[in-house]
Image (cartoon, rainbow, N blue to C red):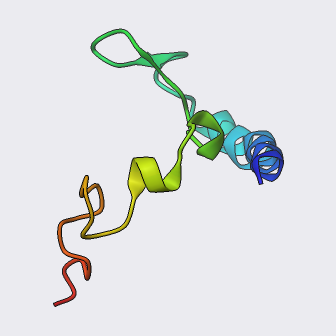
């Protein structure tokens, strides 16, 4: 999956992004947070190491990253 995302990101950069930036240049060459941390143009799953169960989990289960209700807010 990561290889596919990388390929699709490259296609996006070479087509959609280039077309838009050629018409509407970005305000700055580089963007960063107020703490000086660089901000990338786009983030994909390739940019993070995620263990679904450990880091995200399921709704209604500790650490409640997806809400405290297992049905979310659907009643």
Q: Residue 45's x, y, as percent?
A: 61, 45
Q: Residue 73's x, y, as percent?
A: 19, 80
Q: Residue at x 68, y 35 (%)?
A: 22
Foreground pick, 47 / 32: 47
Q: Residue 58's x, y, as percent?
A: 37, 67
Foreground pick, 52 / 7: 52
Query: Above or below — where is 65 with respect to 22?
Result: below
Residue 29 falls in image quadrant: top right
**Relative to 31, 8 lies left or right:** right
Query: Above or below — where is 15 with respect to 58?
Result: above
Q: Residue at x 25, y 52 (%)?
A: 63
Residue at the extreme top of the image, as rendered: 36
Q: Residue at x 57, y 37 (%)?
A: 49
Q: Residue at x 73, y 38 (%)?
A: 18
**Relative to 8, 42 lies left or right:** left
Foreground pick, 11 / 7: 7
Foreground pick, 31 / 55: 55
Query: Above or below — where is 22 with respect to 35?
Result: below
Q: Residue 65's x, y, as percent?
A: 28, 55
User: Exactly how many numbered labels are in the figure?
Assistant: 0
The quarter of the rendered structure image containing the C terminus is bottom left
The quarter of the rendered structure image containing the N terminus is bottom right
**Relative to 3, 55 lies left or right:** left
């Amino acid at each position: 999956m990561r290889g596919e995302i990388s390929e699709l990101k490259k296609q996006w950069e070479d087509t959609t992004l280039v077309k838009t930036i050629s018409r509407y240049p970005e305000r700055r060459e580089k963007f960063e947070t107020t703490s000086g941390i660089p901000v990338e143009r786009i983030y994909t799953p390739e940019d993070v190491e995620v263990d679904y169960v450990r880091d995200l989990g399921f709704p209604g289960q500790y650490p409640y990253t997806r809400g405290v209700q297992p049905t979310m807010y659907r009643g």
